[in-house]
Amino acid sequence: MRLLAALIGLLIAVPAWADCPLDLGRGTGIVVFSSHYLIAFRPDPLRIEVGEPFSLLFNVCTKNDKPAELVAVDAQMPEHKHGMNYRPTIVSLGEGRYRVDGMVFHMPGRWELAIDVRAGEESERLSHEFVVK
Amino acid sequence: MKRWLLGALLAALAASAVAQAPLPWSDDEVKAIARHGPWPPPAPSDPSNRVAGMPNAIVLGEHLFNEPRLSADGAMSCATCHVAGRDWGDGRAKAMGRRELDRRTPSLWNVGYAHWFGWDGAGDSLWSQSIRPILDPREMAGDAARVAGLLREGKALACGYERAFGHRPNGDDEKLLVDAAKALAAFQATLVSPRTPFDAFRDALVAGDREAAARYPLAAQRGLKIFIEANCAACHFGPRFTNGEFGDVGIPFFTRPGEVDSGRLDGLGKLANSTFNLLGKHNDDASGASALRTRHVQRLHSNFGEFRVPSLRQLGSGPFMHNGHFATLEDVVKHYSEVNPDRLHSDALPLVRPLALTSEQSADLIAFLRTLSAEAPPRPTPPPLCP
Ligand SMILES: [Cu+2]
């Protein structure tokens, strides 16, 4: 809730972000942001099953409306100190939209997604946590 | 007198409680247990194999499975090592082909649900995995020409081929070898292990049927608690009790002095070099979706010494592990109880740690593991190829 309020505050404060389409279809999306980037994404299929391949659909926006690039996506289990057994690939769909294929969370538990984005000289890593059961 | 009566009454009550109530299970535990079912799952599907699930291909596959003429000396068939009455294994620590191999013959129960095959995952489809033993000089030592010849010229087999594939055996030797393997795969995918006492308990728990749940032995229930507590399901996940991936639980992997079986690391190299992998021309799935894992899998340092996480269903009487390192289930549980973390070759995965079980706890865990098996009905003789 507090996150949502912060997000709305942010959207109002930064005009360019108001245009950032957060909904990636099906009315669902996860949103992560920093002072430069606003990233919306959702898994496809929506429910991540342990051991089953899935994709991620991304929408990457920047504060100043400059084009941003999704550079890399990876995930690891911090408690188990290991990453994925698969290397995802990124396909650009234009206008800040991306599709990431070949993700597999092969164990139940906490996975930390790392999203590397770049706009011009500036690159940054944002992250999001999933718990798959 | 009254005191005595009360005591007897209490004792009787306690006894009946033991016999009739399941252990208390939290919502989280019930959810975790539910993930190990339902059983059986829907029949496996394999878009990379155009005859998967087709009755005539399954019959042809079963005949080929028992066919010693696939081997160079006409003496060895798949069934030599994968014996129906031995849970589709051979009961040996290491398989015996034309000479002793380095690994144990795995059971073929539920093999149709896997996505990597062999202890090292060198195969990415059931049909490509079925080609390996035919060609391996240490096993059946056959070749494509021999298999193709049998399909073209063996009267019954040629007829069985035509029924399964809808046309006479044509094409080059390699294509016919692959077709034989696809029929073998269609057959093996039908080997689904029976429902077990665990499945009855799991379903009762999910349905909230305490009475039915209480029929599951208490020792097994206590063992299941240990299984959950120890996070065995991090790897032994889902209805088959395997996530289908690879792990290192500290089993020595020296094959002979100075030689190691590097497991998954080597398996990924073999996979990439195989003309029969799902990226090749023999994949029947035009969409390419079935090759997704093969396309994205990455070779990691940590793959050294990793072996595929085995299913825990229908474990059989052993030996266990990729090289038959342990003779009994007792030995396996002792290993997990006492494993030396320094023996783990990967970067200290905190997933496997010495559990320090008491002898009662070990017995409970074994009691639980044994409830993942049930007697399978005897295998009927396969129907004739061309009646
Ligand atoms: Cu993990």
Image: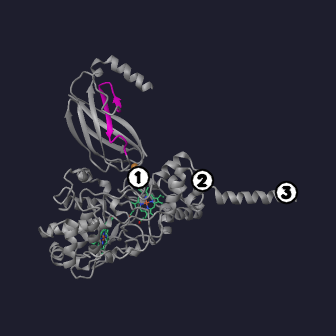
Helix, strand or loop under label 3: helix
What is the number of callouts on the image? 3
Q: Nearer the viewer, residue B181 or A100?
A: B181
A91 over B45 or under it: above or below: above
Which mark's residue is nearer the viewer, 1 or 2?
A: 2
Is A82 drawn above or below residue B244 in the view shown? above
The front one of B13 and B155 is B155
Count residues near mark 1 (Cα–Cα under 10 Å), then give few for <14, some for 14-19, many for 20+. Answer: some
Specify the label residue B3 is tagged with. Answer: 3
Give the residues in magenta: A28-48
Residue under the image location 28 percent in, 26 percent down: A21
Pair 3/2: label in front: 2
Label 2's element?
A: helix
Q: Which residue is mark 1?
A: B349
Q: Amino acid at mark 2?
A: Arg
Between discs 3 and 1, the one toward the N terminus: 3
| Residue A31 % position (x, y) | 35, 30
User: Would you say residue B290 sits in the magenta stretch?
Assistant: no
Residue for badge 2: B210
